[in-house]
Every structure is written in C-alpha cells, then in structure tokens.
Amino acid sequence: MASMQEKMIREAMAAMNGQTAADVAVNLYPFIRKYTDGRVERLLTSSYVPASEDAGRGRGGVGVATRDVVVDRDNGVSARLFLPSSAATGGGGGGRRLPVVLYFHGGSFCTESAFCRTYHRYASSLASRAGALVVSVEYRLAPEHPIPAAYDDAWAAFRWVESLSDPWLAEYGDLRRTFVAGDSAGGNIAYHTVARAGRENVGGGIQGLIMVHPFFWGPERLPCETVWDGASVFPAFGVDWLWPFVTAGQADNDDPRIDPADDELASLPCRRVLMAVAGRDTLRDRGRRLASRMRGDVTVVESEGEDHGFHLYSPLRATSKRLMQSIVQFINQPPSPCPPPPAPAPSPAMRWPATILPEFDEWSSTYSDDTANSSQILLGMPARAYKAIFVDRMDRKAAKTGRLSSNPTVNASLSIGPSGKASKTSCYGMSFGRTRAYNFRGVAAAGSGQCQPPFRGVTI
C-alpha cells in the first residue's frame, strides 16, 4: 500500500497546467503524461538534428559523417549511422575495419529519438572516440506502440546489421566485433536483443553487451529503493508505474522481461558485458544485481555521486568523460578468444535477497582482488544532480513560454538539499567523486579457472 507521502506527491505531480488529478490518467514526470481523454504529452524531448555525410571536424580532430537509413519499412523502423572520418581516410578496402555498435536510446520506452540532439551528440562522440561505426536505432515508442514493439524493432535492426546490406557496413564494419549497447530503457532493449540472438543461435559475432543505467525492476523493492531522498530522478513508486504503462497493462513488475531468469542470463552469446551504474540512481542495485548473476567476463563501472543518465546531459563533466573512456576501452579490447561459457548445471533459481549483499563493502568481495579497489579520485566535479541540470531547467524554460510543466509543490518535493533550493554553492560546489571499474567473473563461474577475462586489472 502506498505511503501517505507517496500519495501526496502523486497528487502534487498531477496538479499542473490547470489540470486536476482526475484529468491525468498516467503521470510519469519528467518523461510523459497521458490524460483521460487519450492525449499523450511527451515532456522529455530535445530538438531534431539532421544527418550530414560531411564529417567536418569533431572534438579531438575526428569528424563523424552521419546518414539515415530505413531498416524495416513496414513498421517504420529506421536508424542513423555514424562513421568516423578516420575510417574513410584509412579505407575499409585496405583491411581496416571498425567495430560495429548497435545502439538503443533511452527514454523510458516512450520518449526521445535517435535523431534528437541529445542522442545525436552522444552517438557522434562514441563513434569518434571509440573509432566505431555506430548504428543508432529509431524504434517505435509506447504507449502508441506498447512493448514488445521496441523489442521487435531492435531485432529487425540487429538482423539488418548482420545482412551488411548498407554500403557503410559492408565496407567498414567488422561484424566479428559487434557490440549491442543502450542506456536506460535502451539498456533493457539491448539485453533482450542479445538474449534473443542466443535463443535463435545467431549471435556468434556479438563481442560485447553494454548497458548504461539499464531499466530492470521487480515486484519486491531492494534496500536502496525503500528510501527516496527527493532529489533522484526516479522515485521507486514512479518506477512501479512504468512497466504496466508501456505494456498497455498486459504485464506487471513480476514480468521476466524486467527481472530475467538465471538460465537466460547464463545463455547470453556475447563474450563480455559492461554494466554501468550511477551511485544515486534508484536503479543502481538492479544493475549490480543483474551483473552479479551473469557468468563469464563482466565489467561493472560505478559513477559515484551521479544520477540516472547524467552523462547525456552533462557530457563535459569529469565523471561523464570517465564513463565514456571506460566504454571506449571496453570496445577496443582485443576480441576475446574464449567461447561463451557452457550452461550451468540445473540449480534452484536465485532470487532476492539470496544473491545480493546489502552493504557496499560486502559487494567488493564479489570482485577480483586486483581490481576491487581500482579507482581514481576526480577533483572539482560539479555537484549538481540531474534534476538541477535538466528538470529545473525545463521548468524555467516552460515558465518563460507560458507552458508550465510542473507545479511549484512538485518542485518543493523534489528539491535539492535541506533548504529546498539549488543555490550556486550546492549546484556548482567542489566535491569528490570517482568512477570505479570492477572486473569479475560471475558468481556461478568464480573459481572455475576457465576463460580468464582479458579486461582484468584495468584502472580508468
């Protein structure tokens, strides 16, 4: 049963733009609202950016050419390709081929786009820094197209990449180094794309799975989800509403698509996995838990003091740069010579809390000794939370245009710090923060002595 505090916050979040709670059917602020008359209002959006095959020059002197393609005409699935200028200069015909990153954007399955400024900028940076050919997928969004539409579109994109029907992929792509990646909802989509490749036995070329702040959930709350500080992006009770909404009420939070079974985790065909979590993200322990249940070579990167999706909206932050660096290193590791590990012997399914250690210090015992303490202090990291840099900015912009996106009561309930205000000191003050890289073999494989991870002992 919802607490009185949750009920009060829900009522406050419904009272905006002159609407009453009765006018709002579903409120997933700051992402989307659905009204009782059927209208859908997407709040988290950024402007469209056109593609350009003129690479120009990006940061570090490496430009990126972009081109839009149709993946599945029947379902309206498209993608944007990002090709670093260094590839065209080197010439794919000369034997230099690039890793291929199939990327799925975030946005709670219901907002954002591969063509928006936020994800165009991020994919361009990833292609430039990793020297990779990035395929960013424009999949169908809920609620107009409920899950599993996004999964089906992702699978169509994966098969399209494998077909090498596009000239850029055919000339420059190295399908033996395919990485499937995504953030937030896109991380969940990336996981299910790789899992389906394993079920259909077509994932032999998948070198790695990259999940950044992925959306996974469950019917029972983990310890970190029972308390909300009022500043993090996702209150747990808000996350509870998301999956039933994007599945059109056909699934609840006990759905294995957001709480995968152990046998599925053990059968992933990729050689390596990178899991990135943020220290203040409500979803952080879901990511840690999922990583602890995987077998083989798993890398967990934690950005301390940061919230969900921080790297997208503050790409110049020290922690954002460190996260990008860890992903680039992961992509550019030599291909793993080890085949996917065999399926484990049947055993009772592991479920919370059996596979989770509640204290962070205890978590470190899960990881290999040579990397458990590999961390680097970053000085001068701005202490602004996601809400301060994005949600409040959206409210101020909306106030100027006369389109209020939230009620002052909501802002007070979501405020930063005890004063309820984001002062210059609290927003821009100096603080300590660090990005940790843990490398470990999944619990089920620990001690087997097989396939030592090639990514062990790397400090970022």
Image (spheres, rainbow, N blue to C red):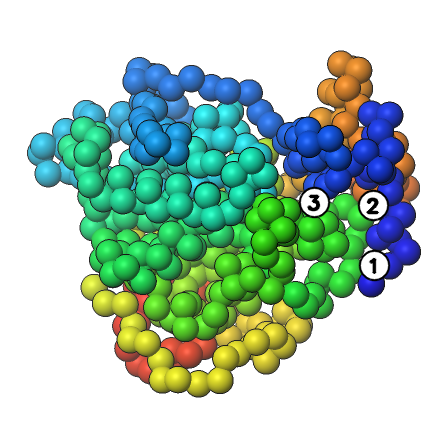
Residue 268 x %, y %: 35, 64
Q: Which element type, helix, strand or loop, lies under badge 1?
A: loop
Look at mark 2 in the image and give the residue it sits on.
Answer: 10
Q: Residues within 10 Å of mark 2 (few under 14, many from 20)?
A: some
Label 3, label 1: how far apart the Cα atoms are:
19 Å
59 is higher (above) or lower (below) than 284:
above
Between discs 1 and 2, the one toward the N terminus: 1
The residue closer to the viewer here, 42 or 183, is 42
Quarter of the figure with residue 269: bottom left
**Residue annotated with mark 3:** 233
| Left or right of residue 93, residue 372 in this image | right
Q: Residue furthest left?
A: 94
Earlier in the chain: of badge 2 and badge 3, it is 2
Q: Residue 181 versus residue 359: which sits nearer the camera?
A: 181
Secondary structure under tag 2 reads helix
> Measuring 39% from the left and 23% from the top, which residue is drawn there?
58
Question: Label 2 vs label 3: CA separation?
Answer: 15 Å
Query: Who's the residue at 68% across and 39% down the image?
Result: 386
Say which quadrant the N terminus sits in. Answer: bottom right
Q: Are marks 3 and 1 in contact (CB under 8 Å)?
A: no
What percent of the width, then of the height, locates residue 222? 68, 67
Q: Tell me what residue is drawn at x 55 percent, y 20 percent.
A: 47
Is there CB contact under 8 Å for labels 1 and 2?
yes
Label 1 sits on residue = 2
Viewer-nearest residue: 183 or 431: 183
Q: Which three-letter amino acid code belongs to the residue tagged 2?
A: Arg
At label 3, the amino acid type is: Val
Toward the front, the furthest residue is 37
Classify mark 3: residues with Cα within 10 Å, few (<14), some (14-19) or many (20+): many
**What percent of the width, then of the height, locates residue 422?**
81, 35
Give the mark, 3 or 1, whose residue is nearer the N terminus: 1
Q: CA distance from mark 1 to mark 2?
A: 10 Å
